[in-house]
Image (cartoon, grey):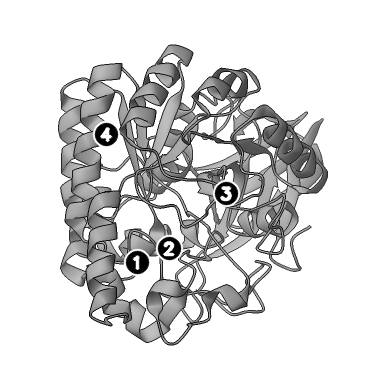
Amino acid sequence: MFDLLVKNGKLVCEKEVILADLAVKDGAICAIGKNLGEAVQTIDAQGNLIFPGGIDVHVHFNEPGNEEWEGFETGSRLLAAGGITRYFEMPLNSNPPTIDVGALRLKKELAKEKSIIPPYFWGGLVPGNVQQLAALAKEGVVGFKAFLSNSGFEPFPSVEKETLLEGMREIARLGKILALHAESNELTDFMQREKRKKGKTTPQDYAESRPIIAEVEAVHRALYFAELTGCSLHFVHISSAKAVELIQEAKSRGMDVTVETCPHYVWFNDEALNERGVLAKCAPPLRPEKERKQLLDCLLNGQIDMVASDHSPCPPWMKDLKNQNFFEAWGGINGGQFTLLALLTLCDQHQVSYVNVAKWLSANPAKRFQHERVGRLEVGCDADFTIVAKKPFTVTQENHFAKHKATVYEGETFHHTIVATYCKGRCVYEESGHPI
């Protein structure tokens, strides 16, 4: 007798989509096939798609200290509503940031109490904390995050070259991964000063102050440092095909490096900055349409390892424009609920197999971060999956489960709808009501 039997689903597996039933026992997938037997609970998937639960390796829930921005309760619920069953929470913008064991333990306690899906945590690399990295690694962080440009969050400063080299050497010794926000601080600061001197503070001025060359220069530098130190790298929210090309070249030389992009970089272009204002502000900024298409081609052609949301919300007042100065508004996209839906629609538009979505959002993150029991619909894996129907979903403030509802995605229509999400065989979201 199974605990749960999901019948008549189209299972999105590693190499193909198959019509089969899926059985769950004690939180794990125990059988896949037809005529499997009886279960305590049986669900008829009615021919809908069943994807492995997504793993979002890049979210900011800001708790403790700034839980009014999002928090583990609402943050985990919105992810579940988007088909995500695991997430990696970043070391900022919580206060204290996760740069020592005390801060990590506090964050763990809060997440254990409030999160409805399993959390994992990045530690931080900042000036002065290299000696803390070993203890953080022992405490179980998935890796370490550092900024090569100003983070915008004072308690989490960017790393200068000496800290970066020392940190990389230590992270390599610990066998961990360094995640990098790769924009050149020197170039972006210079460009921003030039703009402000001339009183140029429009959305387009902001985008021009963070050009693709700033991303490319930072990626170049990080790869050189990693080659010297032997440090494994993961580049977060890469926004340009030129940077992807550099990373692919490094891979071809045998370097241990992976790259993520975000749904907003392949869904929107820089016109959204004028059309939707500060809701579209992020760093790196949204790129012109030509660049968006090139980045999307990189993703569809298998040159990008994974897609993560970089969900980075804030209270409404932080998105207010001060004296119409776009530089002053908080930069972050509120969109963690819509990663899977955006990717599925893009695959439809470009006639790409849904198998790729399962790789970008589940299998590749699980493999990169050595989470062996998740990321695939296979016997022995945890029963993490989401049921997806082919019916339109239009984003409204009512069906967006973030703490603060305003999002650049409002009004966007996707081709699919999340019907239900299960984590270790337990329903954590169902479409008929609010997240459980």
Task: Kindly tell me whether residue 209 is visible in this rendering.
Answer: no
Q: Who is closer to the viewer here, 18 or 139?
A: 139
Contact between labelled residues 2 and 1, with CB atoms less than 8 Å apart: yes
Query: In terms of sequence position, does the residue under pointer 3 or pointer 1 come before the other?
Result: 3
Q: Mark 1 and mark 4: span between their CA atoms?
A: 27 Å
Q: x, y (%) of residue 301?
A: 21, 46
Query: In terms of sequence position, does the residue under pointer 3 or pointer 2 come before the other?
Result: 3
Q: Which residue is mark 3?
A: 9
Query: In terms of sequence position, does the residue under pointer 1 or pointer 4 come before the other?
Result: 4
Q: Which residue is mark 4?
A: 222
Q: Which residue is mark 2?
A: 342
Single out the mark in the foreground, 2 or 4.
Answer: 4
Q: Mark 2 and mark 4: span between their CA atoms?
A: 30 Å
Three-letter amino acid code at the position of disc 3: Gly
Single out the mark in the foreground, 1 or 2.
Answer: 1
Q: Residue at x 73, y 68 (%)?
A: 432
Q: Residues within 10 Å of mark 2 (few under 14, many from 20)?
A: many
Three-letter amino acid code at the position of disc 4: Ala
Q: Residues within 10 Å of mark 4 (few under 14, many from 20)?
A: many
Three-letter amino acid code at the position of disc 2: Ala
